[in-house]
Image (cartoon, rainbow, N blue to C red):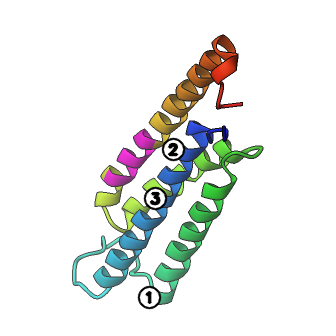
Amino acid sequence: MKAKKSAKIQFTSTTLLLEAFLVLFATLVAYGLRTVPYAWPDRLQVPSGPAIWIVGGTLMVVLILLSRMVGGPGGYVAGSVVQLPVIACGFAVPLMFLVGGIFVVLWVVSLRLGGRIDRERAEYDAAHPETAPNM
């Protein structure tokens, strides 16, 4: 039988890919809001279109790259660190504080639940070596 992929890797990778789409849509919103009067606080200078796309695009690329690296050394730490800039997108699009926070919760759940599933699979395989597809 073919070994199953790690649930932790699958869950965290999917979460980071979904966050990349989230950042894409937040970038589109920020780009559209740059011409709306009173959309940006007075204390902030309205960023230029290219600046919005450079920041958003860079964050999207980082999220996509990290989604492929979560199983490697430091992948989970880097995935956890990148949650901060996702939440910081809320300074440009205030709803991102809420949606980014939801994705942080999803990230933590992915780490914990994926790890638990992997442990339970290993325990099952140890108890049933003759039917162990997860080796």
Q: CA distance from mark 3 to mark 1?
A: 21 Å
Q: Which residue is mark 2?
A: 11
Q: Which residue is mark 3?
A: 19
Q: Position of residue 107 (x, y in %)?
A: 48, 42
Residue 19 appears left or right of 63: left
Q: Is residue 30 above or below residue 130?
A: below
Q: Which residue is mark 1?
A: 49
Task: Find the magenta span and give its range.
Answer: 99-106
Task: Tell which residue pokes out farthest to the top in this image.
Answer: 127
Q: Position of residue 71 (x, y in %)?
A: 69, 45
- Which residue corresponds to the image point at 49% horizontal and 38% vertical from the top-left? 110
User: Element at badge 2?
Assistant: helix
Say if mark 1 contacts mark 2, CB within 8 Å. no
Where residue 27 sits, quadrant-wise, is bottom left
Give the label, 1 or 2, closer to the camera.
2
Q: Earlier in the sequence, mark 2 or mark 3?
A: 2
Residue type, label 2: Phe
Give the label, 2 or 3, closer to the camera.
2
User: Element at badge 1?
Assistant: helix
Q: Earlier in the sequence, mark 3 or mark 1?
A: 3
Q: Is residue 121 above or below residue 11?
A: above
- Which residue corresponds to the image point at 30% horizontal and 83% vertical from the top-left? 32
Placement of the N terminus among the 4 image quadrants:
top right
Where residue 94 sits, quadrant-wise, is bottom left
Residue type, label 1: Gly
- Which residue corresponds to the image point at 66% horizontal and 41% vertical from the top-left? 2
